[in-house]
Amino acid sequence: MSAPSGFREALARLASAQKTAKGAPAYSRFVNRKLGRLLAAVAYVLGLTPNMVTAISAAFTFTGIALIALVEPAAWLGVAVCLALVVGYAFDAADGQLARLRGGGSKSGEYLDHMVDSCKISALHLAVLISWYRFGDLDEPAFLLVPVGFTVVAAVMFFGMILKDLLARAHRAATGAPAPPAVAPSAIRSLLVIPTDYGLLCVAFLLIGVPAVFQPLYGLIFAGNLLFLLAASVKWFREVGALDAPAAPAAAAPAQGREGALR
């Protein structure tokens, strides 16, 4: 297949080269991937590589994280942090799409993307901890444990999802088992899991300058992530446990047919 000749053709090609939306929460599915598609088409026209796009994503994201930790909360700060995180997340969606548009990604590119992601999901909540410690007027200091807990939950959830998929791919490569059949994504499920949506968290920082609203909202998002992780961990353990099951023996009928042929 020939390479796209310009922005419009690249955008059209990207529309048919999306990864599955199964399990993706609402903002990531309906907003961020579309923004990422636009940015991937622009990056393609400009001749950027996927790793360059990953670097741009990291620059925006960690600028937003630094602002959270270093600047006293204010209305303008909420706008700046929200924009930085939202743009960084959109570029995070664009690097993989650009890789597929260029004919496929690389192992090193996937490694770089996951390393940036793993760093940002922990650093973001530690920045909230620093901000609340430096500038917050918390009635209950124990509330500082919320971003600490969120750091742990976010890191464990990210690692669990990555490891589950890695083990499943390794199992299929070793056994020749087919990939699971494609399942139509559910809009209802996308809405139900929205508390786990990183995009929702990015938008929530718009209210960081209003601590009376942001702090309980952040706490609710943390509670949603914690509950999801507890339920998902059980489900993931069962899925990985199913990979340990011995392969089913060959069916008797085909074996008898082969014996008949030998006779």
Image: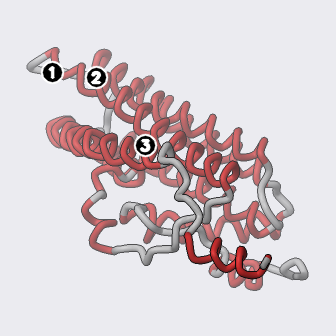
Residue 249 lies in quadrant:
bottom right
- As drawn, 211 above or below 144: below
x, y percentage for residue 93?
A: 59, 58
Front residue of 141 and 243: 243
| Amino acid residing under circle 2 | Trp
Residue on which the image places disc 1: 138
Residue 53 at least partly seen: yes
Tell me which numbered mark, 3 or 2, is placed earlier along the sequence. Answer: 2
Query: Residue 132 shows which numbered tag?
Result: 2
Q: Which residue is drawn at 62% across and 60% down?
A: 177
Residue 116 lies in quadrant:
top right
Give the SS element for disc 3: helix
Tell me the quarter of the image containing the N terminus.
bottom right
Front residue of 166 and 25: 166
| Amino acid residing under circle 3 | Gly
Marks 1/2 in contact by CB < 8 Å: the verdict is yes
Residue on which the image places disc 3: 241
From mark 3 to mark 1, how far is it between C-alphas? 44 Å
| Amino acid residing under circle 1 | Leu
Tell me which numbered mark, 3 or 1, is placed earlier along the sequence. Answer: 1
x, y percentage for residue 58?
A: 63, 40
Marks 3/2 in contact by CB < 8 Å: the verdict is no
